[in-house]
Amino acid sequence: SIILGIESSCDETSAAICIDGKICSNIIANQTVHEKFGGVVPELASRAHQQNIIPTVGQAIREAKIHKNDIDAVAFTRGPGLLGSLLVGTSFAKAFALARNIPLIDVNHMQAHILAHFIEAPVPDFPFLCLTVSGGHTQLVLVKDYFQMELVGQTLDDAAGEAFDKTAKILGLPYPGGPLIDRYAQLGNADAFTFPEPQIPGLNFSFSGLKTSILYFVQQREAEQPGFVQNHLNDICASVQARIVSILINKLKRAARENSVADIAIAGGVSANSGLRAAVNKLGEEQGWRIFIPRFEYCTDNAAMIAIAGHYKYFARDFVGQDVAPLARYSL
Ligand code: ATP
Ligand code: MG
Ligand code: FE
């Protein structure tokens, strides 16, 4: 079967073609209009999706070397995400399915981030534990089957990606700051400064206290020593990143033990972080757990993960009608 996947939940417009479970194209149009605003501006995101969607889908079809009449079903991100952004992908998918008289498949974006692990071998065995860390979510998920997922822990305030992006903003770096912090951290000393680890019971996370402590730290040091941030940027980034990573790793370790799983996965944009990748691999070696990390292009928002989710739903004949509507909030 040939599945067209469409992703438009936030600020990436993406289209992918999946043929019999194999990804043959994955086109991602990044929106640069948000950079100067220090965050995603929803109105601008919707407009950019509207401009990008047709060319992006066209390119995905060309790169996969198929004809649009060959497509058997359209899978699209129904949520969670920005409603105006989701509406563009949803409306496109509905129109395409209606015009071609083919099935329509709705996909949960957070499930898709996890299902990105089934794009390429090696794939984890069920049940496995997935730490999904992205711009809007931080979740510990017990994955029992392709679409049977149990949320065992989550953030009580900011997401891990938000912690990276907000720290970057405090340090005067452009949006999205996560990848920049990662780059500077690789040049710095993670023991240079110490930021607090929140004491949150169970498997939940909190990052808002860390953000506040970084803000106070920067304000105080800059007052004492103007230019402090500029002169110590690498060390600050390395120290902040080390703390975010240790918060994530400690809960991941606990969740894996409590649920007796030995296959551990990470997903979402923050799983591109080199510090997190190294720490998760080290945890696996120490504990004898198998670690799964998606290839970089399948970590951040992409339609390949939507198409692969669509592939499994197509198999199960799990379709939706033309009356389907996107959902800004959509649980696992
Ligand atoms: P959600 O999936 O929760 O709806 P989202 O789709 O915006 O949110 P993703 O695109 O999966 O999130 O991830 C984007 C986030 O990942 C941003 O916060 C970005 O800063 C962060 N990120 C990307 N690369 C890195 C990196 N190398 N280090 C740290 N953070 C990173
Ligand atoms: Mg994004
Ligand atoms: Fe995402």
Image (spheres, rainbow, N blue to C red):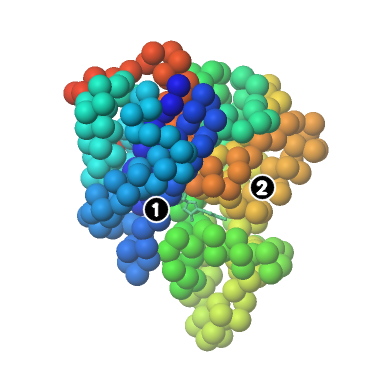
Determine whether 186 is above or below 115 in the image. Answer: below
Q: Secondary structure at mark 1?
A: strand
Q: Residue lying at the far left in this picture: please name it.
A: 323
Alpha carbon of mark 2 to alpha carbon of mark 1: how far? 25 Å
Q: Residue lying at the far top in this picture: please name it.
A: 316
Mark 1 sits near ligand 2, with its Cβ under 8 Å away: no
Q: Position of residue 62 (x, y in %)?
A: 42, 43
Residue under label 2, please give it: 277
Rendered residue at 66%/47% (across/down): 277
Q: Secondary structure at mark 2?
A: helix
Direction from residue 169 to residue 286 in the image, left or right? right
- Nearer the camera: disc 2 or disc 1: 1
Rendered residue at 64%/49% (across/down): 276
Rendered residue at 70%/47% (across/down): 279
Image quadrant in which you'd find residue 317: top left
Determine whether 67 is above or below 39 in the image. Answer: above
Q: Residue lying at the far bottom in this picture: please name it.
A: 226
> Looking at the image, is mark 2 or mark 1 earlier in the sequence?
1
Rendered residue at 25%/57% (across/down): 44
Please tell me the numbered disc located at residue 29. Answer: 1
Q: Which quadrant is home to the C terminus?
A: top left
